[in-house]
Amino acid sequence: MKGKILDFNSEMKSGHVRDENEHKYPFFIGDCKNPQKIKLGANVDFEHDGEKAITITINDSVDDTTIQEENKSKKLLAVKSKKNISILLIAIVILTLGALIAILVLSDIQNKKFKDVEKRYESEINNIKNFLNKEDCSSAVDQYKQASNTRNDLYKYGRYYSIESHAEHAHAIDIAECFVSQNDFTNAVEMLDIKTTNSIDYLNRAAIIYAKAGDSARAQQARNKVREIIP
């Protein structure tokens, strides 16, 4: 009976042959007369016992059709593998671009929010100036408190004003002097904080306000701090 080798597992030392009628039979290497010639697609003469191929003689010729089919299969697998890799790379690129776009969008949103808060802060500072020009001390201090809250919002976006720089920027000492001009020493003193500043101008002005308010102890503290800064 004639046929050809369909497959062979070198580890299991077994494979399959197919006869001319397309019947498939398993075989073992021990059933081959010349096992050194085992090759996929090789033509064989064999017999069978109803279940497996026996007395197998492997001829030198190989079925070209089998080789071509095998090569074609390998090429198809290679093409499919490359296609899958290409699809994976495209997916990675799309995901990466999506992530970058999302980051840029979020960054733009955050930047816009920061600019809006910064504009609000500067607007509140300008309002303080206007209220002071009108000698409206109460409105100025209310706006000062609002600006202090906005300062905290700016900190969330990475912009930091120290208490000292905020007090200077938001005219805290000017508001205190506004209250002094109206003999409202209680509110004037509440605006002062000599512990958090090293501004000589601020400390000298605060000393005068404390003195006018009758708080000689803190007036002296302000003067002493000036001496520490300028021995």
Image (spheres, rainbow, N blue to C red):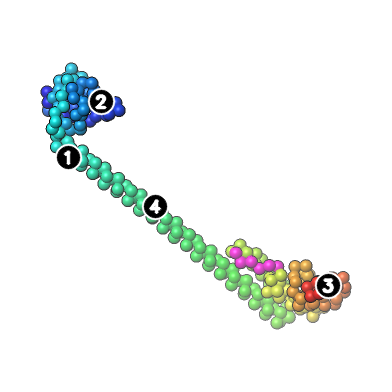
Question: Is 53 or 186 nearer to us in this picture?
Answer: 53
**Residue, x 78% and y 70% (percent of image)?**
194
What is the count of numbered marks? 4
Mark 1 / mark 3, whichever is N-terminal: 1
> Which disc, if any, is residue 68?
1
Left or right of 31 in this view: 194? right
Residue 216's x, y, as percent? Answer: 87, 73
Identify the residue under disc 3: 224
**Residue, x 83% and y 72% (percent of image)?**
224
Question: Is 173 or 126 nearer to us in this picture?
Answer: 173
Mark 4 / mark 3, whichever is N-terminal: 4
- Disc 3 marks which amino acid? Asn
Mark 4 / mark 1, whichever is N-terminal: 1
Nearer the observer: mark 3 or 2; the answer is: 2
Q: Residues within 10 Å of mark 1 (few under 14, many from 20)?
A: few
22 vs 216: above or below:
above
> Which disc, if any, is residue 92?
4
Whether label 4 touches label 3, CB < 8 Å: no
Nearer the observer: mark 4 or 2; the answer is: 2
- Specify start and end residues of the magenta stretch as a single range: 158-163
Identify the residue under disc 2: 14
Mark 4 / mark 2, whichever is N-terminal: 2
Q: Quadrant of residue 6?
A: top left
Element carrying mark 2:
strand
Nearer the observer: mark 1 or 3; the answer is: 1
Where the C terminus falls, by quadrant?
bottom right
